[in-house]
């Protein structure tokens, strides 16, 4: 054992972007690194297939991976959930077409780290729930979920992304995440390079950007 589990800096929660594709379009995966958790090459799809961007209201997408024993040996329960704000016919039609189908996803967190969620053996099944909300101040839209059991955990991915991230460069490219702290060391939040940071307060605030 080693001390890799010790605290070594900011660990930003949440996912900033999700790309999904039908599991049937996924070509054989590249080899894994010695750790057995990191893909060594690009994830590729069959000719004519492509990745689609799924919009999740900021700070709602989340990935949960839980080790679970099965009759076939060790396995993992993977679930990726989030909320899509708004409603219109094109969105409703897309969710209806996706319902019950299986997908794999590339999930990008706020530190630019990417994981392949789901595996070629079956992918994750999509489901959703629509809500109108009860009051004008509440959000209407769709709670969505990709859920399934896989042989291994979500794999780390360092290859090229299918498209630039919304509002910023792709992971591994120029730019990155800006961490915003107060002068006393309190963490305020993050922003991708090129975004504008607005802090409102009745008091004078001094910040440090690193």
Image (tube, rainbow, N blue to C red):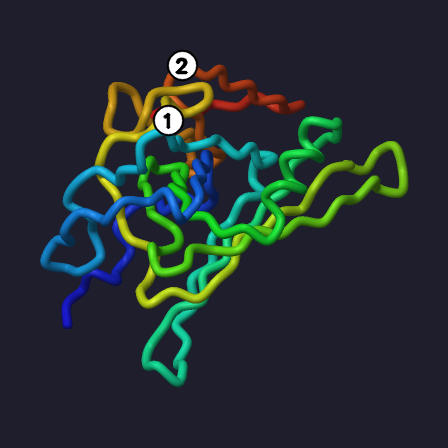
Identify the residue at image location x=73%, y=30%: 86
* Residue at the (31%, 41%) spot, across then down: 113
Compared to residue 73, the image places residue 90 above or below, namely: above
Q: Which residue is mark 1?
A: 178
Q: Position of residue 26 (x, y in %)?
A: 33, 45
Question: Quadrant of the rendered structure where residue 25 is?
Answer: top left
Q: How many marks?
A: 2
Element at label 2? loop
Within the image, what quadrant is residue 111 found in?
A: top left
Q: Residue furthest bottom?
A: 71
Name the quarter where the N terminus is drawn: bottom left
Image coordinates of residue 105 in percent, x first then y, are: 41, 44
Q: Nearer the viewer, residue 75 or 17?
A: 75
Give the distance between the C-alpha atoms of the residues marked 2 and 1, in whole angstroms. 9 Å
Question: Residue visible at 40% across and 25% down?
Answer: 165
Q: Residue 194 bears which disc, if any?
A: 2
Helix, strand or loop for disc 1? strand
Residue most toward the front? 47
Answer with left or right where residue 135 lies relative to residue 197. Answer: right
Q: Is residue 13 left or right of residue 10?
A: right
Residues 210 and 24: in front is 24
Q: Position of residue 202 (x, y in %)?
A: 67, 23
């Amino acid at each position: 054992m080693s001390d890799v589990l010790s605290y070594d800096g900011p660990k930003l929660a949440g996912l900033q972007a999700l790309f999904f594709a039908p599991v049937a379009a996924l070509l054989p995966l590249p080899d894994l690194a010695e750790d057995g958790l990191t893909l060594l090459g690009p994830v590729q799809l069959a000719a004519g297939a492509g990745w689609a961007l799924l919009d999740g209201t900021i700070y709602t997408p989340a990935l949960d991976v839980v080790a679970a024993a099965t009759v076939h040996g060790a396995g993992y329960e993977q679930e990726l959930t989030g909320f899509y704000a708004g409603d219109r016919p094109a969105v409703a039609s897309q969710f209806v077409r996706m319902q019950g189908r299986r997908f794999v996803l590339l999930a990008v967190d706020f530190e630019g780290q990417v994981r392949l969620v789901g595996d070629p053996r079956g992918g994750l099944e999509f489901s959703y729930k629509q809500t109108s909300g009860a009051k004008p101040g509440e959000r209407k839209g769709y709670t969505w979920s990709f859920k399934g059991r896989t042989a291994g955990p979500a794999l780390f991915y360092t290859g090229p992304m299918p498209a630039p991230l919304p509002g910023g460069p792709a992971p591994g490219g120029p730019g990155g995440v800006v961490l915003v702290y107060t002068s006393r060391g309190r963490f305020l939040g993050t922003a991708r390079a090129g975004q504008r940071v607005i802090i409102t307060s009745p008091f004078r605030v001094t910040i440090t950007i690193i």
